[in-house]
Image: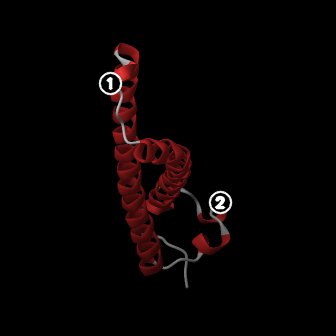
């Protein structure tokens, strides 16, 4: 393998690149770049799904809170659904934070690969 001489990736001199990156062929670099781009897309979709789920739970809690504030006597939310939603908040928030950190790392990797 040789170091890359004909790409935008060369904005970082070969001697500053990490070990494997110094000697990647164009094909290997394209494979790594494609994988990183695909993983970014997957993480973005995952974040959107998690955000949507959290938003739905939040909207349900807002409605329940409004009923409790205005007229607690008519509160008739399904206890199991409410308990399940509240229990899922922490799991979903942890997953969202993890995916967000991984996306930031993956974007940094993409920036490094594309120079």
Q: To which residue does mark 2 refer? A: 16
Which residue is found at the position 45% from the left and 65% from the top? Answer: 36
Apparent side of residue 31 relative to residue 95 in the rendered image (left or right): left
Where is 100 relative to 64, above or below? below
The residue nearer to you, when weighing 91 against 68, is: 68
Coordinates of residue 107 in the picture (x, y in percent): 47, 53
Image quarter where the N terminus lies is bottom right
The residue nearer to you, when weighing 47 against 89, is: 89
Coordinates of residue 111 in the picture (x, y in percent): 47, 53
Coordinates of residue 11 in the picture (x, y in percent): 50, 55
Which residue is found at the position 50% from the left and 53% from the top? Answer: 99
Q: Secondary structure at mark 1?
A: helix
Return the disc, 2 or 1, that comes first in the chain's sequence. 2
Coordinates of residue 72 in the picture (x, y in percent): 39, 20
Which residue is found at the position 40% from the left and 32% from the top? Answer: 61
Q: To which residue does mark 1 refer? A: 74
- Quadrant of the rendered image containing residue 75: top left
Mark drawn on residue 54: none
């Amino acid at each position: 393998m040789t170091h890359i001489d004909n790409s935008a990736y060369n904005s970082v001199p070969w001697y500053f690149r990490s070990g494997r990156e110094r000697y990647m062929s164009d094909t290997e670099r394209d494979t790594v770049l494609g994988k990183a781009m695909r993983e970014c897309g997957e993480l973005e979709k995952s974040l959107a799904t998690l955000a949507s789920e959290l938003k739905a739970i939040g909207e349900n809690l807002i409605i329940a809170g409004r009923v409790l504030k205005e007229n607690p006597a008519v509160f008739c939310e399904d206890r199991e659904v409410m308990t399940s939603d509240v229990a899922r908040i922490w799991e979903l928030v942890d997953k969202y934070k993890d995916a967000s950190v991984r996306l930031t790392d993956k974007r940094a990797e993409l920036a490094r690969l594309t120079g």
